Image (tube, rainbow, N blue to C red):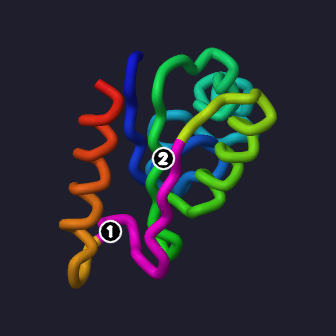
């Protein structure tokens, strides 16, 4: 891709809520290999293009640890990226001026990179 934006991404299927994951992938004990093969964090070296990562720090659906581990992997792979965290915002990233700020941030990124 030339440019991508990820908002609250699941980067490691082992971190995601088991009610959703196990419905399709069974448990990590039964299917651990495919949990790992299909986790985006294990494909960071293949990333090309511009990348913006956004996450709310109070996300209780896709925990912030997904993005933190992805940032660590991106740095280790010497991949350049931009990131923006919304303090105390949940998975929906809203409240006050937050939604406007979120969409403005994404629009500005796309205008700069495309």
- Report which residue position mark 2 lands on: 53
Image coords of residue 77 (percent x, y)? 76, 28
* Residues in magenta, as a range: 82-93
Image coords of residue 24 (percent x, y)? 46, 35
Of the pair 80 and 77, the residue shown nearer to us: 80
Q: Residue at x 32, y 68 (%)?
A: 93
Q: Quadrant of residue 110?
A: top left
Q: Is residue 103 magenta?
A: no
Regarding mark 2 in the picture, which secondary structure is present there? strand
Of the pair 9 and 3, the residue shown nearer to us: 3
Nearer the camera: disc 2 or disc 1: 2
Q: Quadrant of residue 41?
A: top right
Q: Is residue 100 left or right of residue 75?
A: left
Of the pair 87 and 107, the residue shown nearer to us: 107
Q: Residue at x 70, y 41 (%)?
A: 28
In the rendering, which numbered label is found on residue 93? Answer: 1
Q: Residues within 10 Å of mark 2 (few under 14, many from 20)?
A: some
Q: Classify the position of the C terminus by image quarter.
A: top left
Name above or below for residue 98 compared with residue 7: below
Counting residues from the N terminus, which is met first, the one under dot 2 or under dot 1? 2
Q: Is residue 19 left or right of residue 36?
A: left
Name above or below for residue 110 compared with residue 95: above
Q: How far apart are labels 2 and 1 at the CA level?
A: 13 Å
Q: Residue at x 24, y 35 (%)?
A: 111
Regarding mark 1 in the picture, which secondary structure is present there? loop
Name above or below for residue 62 compared with residue 80: below
């Amino acid at each position: 891709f030339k440019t991508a934006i990820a908002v609250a991404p699941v980067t490691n299927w082992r971190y995601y809520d088991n009610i959703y994951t196990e419905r399709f992938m069974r448990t990590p004990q039964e299917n651990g290999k495919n949990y790992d093969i299909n986790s985006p964090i294990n494909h960071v070296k293949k990333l090309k293009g511009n990348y913006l990562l956004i996450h709310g720090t109070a996300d209780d659906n896709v925990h912030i640890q997904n993005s933190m581990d992805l940032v660590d992997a991106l740095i280790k792979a010497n991949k350049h990226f931009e990131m923006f965290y919304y303090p105390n915002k949940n998975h929906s990233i809203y409240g006050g001026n937050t939604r406007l700020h979120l969409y403005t941030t994404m629009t500005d990124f796309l205008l700069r990179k495309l």
